[in-house]
Image (spheres, rainbow, N blue to C red):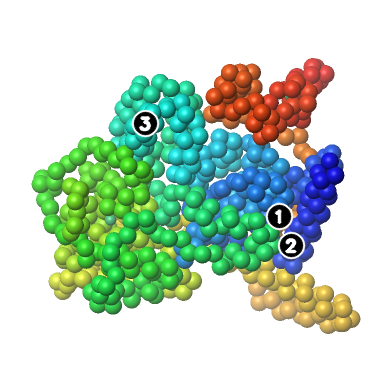
Amino acid sequence: MICRFKANIQIKNDAAALVEYLVKLHAENPEWYFKVDFESIDNRLSKIFWMSPEQKKMWYRYHDVVINDNTCKTNKYSMPLSVFIIIDSDQRSRIVATAIVCDETVSTYEWILEQTKNATGDLQPATIFTDADPAMQNAIHKQYPKSFIRHCSFHIRQNLIKKVKKKLCNKWDTFLGDFYALRNSIVMSDFEHRWTDLINHYPEVQEYCERVSYPTKTCWAYAFTKRSFSANTHSTQRVERNSLCQLHSGIELRLKDEAKYARWQEFRNMNPTTGMPRVSDTIFRNVDEICKKYLTPNSLALQRKQMVESLLYRTWIKEVENIYLLDSNRYDEGFVEDDYEEPQILINMALEACSNGIVNEIWEVRHLQSTKNRSQFVIILDDGSHYCTCLYLIYAGFVCRYFFAVMLQSKIAQFNIKLIPSRWYSKEGLSVMDKIQENSIQLIQDGEQRTGTFYTLNIIRGQEVYNEFIKNLDSKKEIFGRGIGLCKKALNLAIASNSHQVFENLLQQFIEQQTVSLSAQDDDLTEEVLGISNPIQHKGKGRPANKRYLSAIENCSNRNANSKNQDQDEVSEGSRKKNKRQCALCKSWYHDSRNCPSKNKEQDKENI
Ligand SMILES: [Zn+2]
Ligand SMILES: [Zn+2]
């Protein structure tokens, strides 16, 4: 009892210190965003969310792929922690938003997602990776309607082990193979057939699969996710390995440490290339030079690796009629993206994707030591684009080794820095990009300089999220934040040294000068600047009446009624008591008295 009391005091003080710290940071730079919510009963911290100015800038630039991860109770507040992570241009995982919350309900998750929108001017991630928690899934549907939700591959496997392994006993191994084949189906109709087969073969897991897995198929089945950009990641494991282990060490410290995070190891499968000549200095020298000019060091290293490995492949030019077309794939040894040599799409689907352009050449590419009968195909188009069945350019944003192998043979294959999305560019690269149009590079010269429009590829990939509008907003906000900070510092000094009159005169003088020269544009400017600031929103005590949303996937009220029958296999009564909340009013599980349906009913009656 005494212990518990002490712990509460500790939490209160830590929370107070954290809030105080955030208030101070916000005062220094109004670009700091934070939001705090308190329990109505004892004024205890129930939710806190923050984003630093640097984190907001990273969100602007990298919200094409955002990874959300939630851990419960590993921090010193013993409250669930929710972090948002992006992969920066130098291949590092960076935390861009943090929330510490009281529970893991849909409404709490919605509150968190809402804060990211408030902080960043409603910029929703293009793709968001989650751990497949139904509550988060539901919150994302409501708050990020524009985002493409994907489930982290690590958690797909974990959830199967947790939910279906026991029910299958000795059928587990064959089930897992069949599940991978289903999950890795490239063709949509294959997926649907295999789904029906899976349900028929394993009736033990039908209930779970139909209730949980099927409704979210677009988030985890490869047929639906294959063509989306993933910044070269498909697992929140990337996050867990790097950052979450560091969260114990305290929030303030972690914020400083964050920039120093360890590098993430690129691939499980590595081609042996040590001892080979530095091809980036010789054969691919021109390509390498332009990459050096634009890319960050770690992105350059990834791109160079592809150049080096291209020497390990053989290429043949093919006529369309001579290509053996497959209409199906079966891959049951894990996630197909993890297999470095496995084609990620069928050649006929690749040709279909290119049907907007004019196909000039098709190349078959195969590893020198290939044991399996599998090839990649590289399609070269009239507008300079190329499309390769390994999809590395599409999901990772780097030119693949197969294309470099083709460049060594083809007279028309062109490399252009525009093939690589600008999200991998360094600061210098970004600024050069706006000033010059780089010519394409060909390794086999036939006297003609070709620089394509890359129209087909741009159609396939879509626009990058860091567009002119956001770039503009980003730089204005930076100037505004810095200016406010400077003014405050100067004003404090002026007051301390009793020279505020001098300071005011200086400002007045500056304002008069500028007003004269800018009088024509004056109105626009003030309007824009006003729109930029994010005023701190003070909030009184008390918790807003939260409407509790039920997940579409997991109908909570049904679960409560039948919970004893349904959950017997999974959780014992005792462990449930430990993990879940019990209502003080109606004594049922999964909600507390505040959200009790019976209480709400009574209130409704009173209102009538
Ligand atoms: Zn490729
Ligand atoms: Zn209740």
Please, what secondary structure does the residue beneath circle 1 have? strand
Q: Identify the residue at image location x=17%, y=41%.
A: 325
Could you tell which of marks 3 and 2 lies nearer the N-terminus? Answer: 2
The image's mark for residue 26 is 2
Which residue type does callout 2 highlight?
Answer: His
Q: Identify the residue at image location x=42%, y=27%.
A: 168
Please tell me whether mark 3 or mark 2 is closer to you in this view.
Answer: 3
Displayed quadrant of residue 384? bottom left
Graded by Cα atoms within 10 Å as few (under 14), some (14 to 19) or many (20 or more), the crowding at tag 2 reads: some
Q: How far apart are marks 1 and 3 (CA)?
A: 46 Å
Which residue type does callout 3 highlight?
Answer: Phe
Please report contact status of discs 1 and 2: CB closer than 8 Å, yes or no.
yes
Q: Which residue is at the front of the view, 472 or 52?
A: 52
Please, what secondary structure does the residue beneath circle 3 have? helix
Graded by Cα atoms within 10 Å as few (under 14), some (14 to 19) or many (20 or more), the crowding at tag 1 reads: many
Which residue type does callout 1 highlight?
Answer: Phe
Q: In this view, does 27 lie above or below 232?
A: below
Q: Where is residue 22 in the image (x, y as percent from the top left)?
A: 74, 59
Q: How far apart are marks 1 and 2 (CA)?
A: 8 Å
The image's mark for residue 34 is 1
Residue 386 seen in render: yes
The image's mark for residue 175 is 3
Could you tell which of marks 1 and 3 lies nearer the N-terminus? Answer: 1
Residue 470 seen in render: no
Q: Identify the residue at image location x=54%, y=64%.
A: 261
Image quadrant occupied by the N terminus: top right
Q: Position of residue 551 (x, y in %)?
A: 58, 30
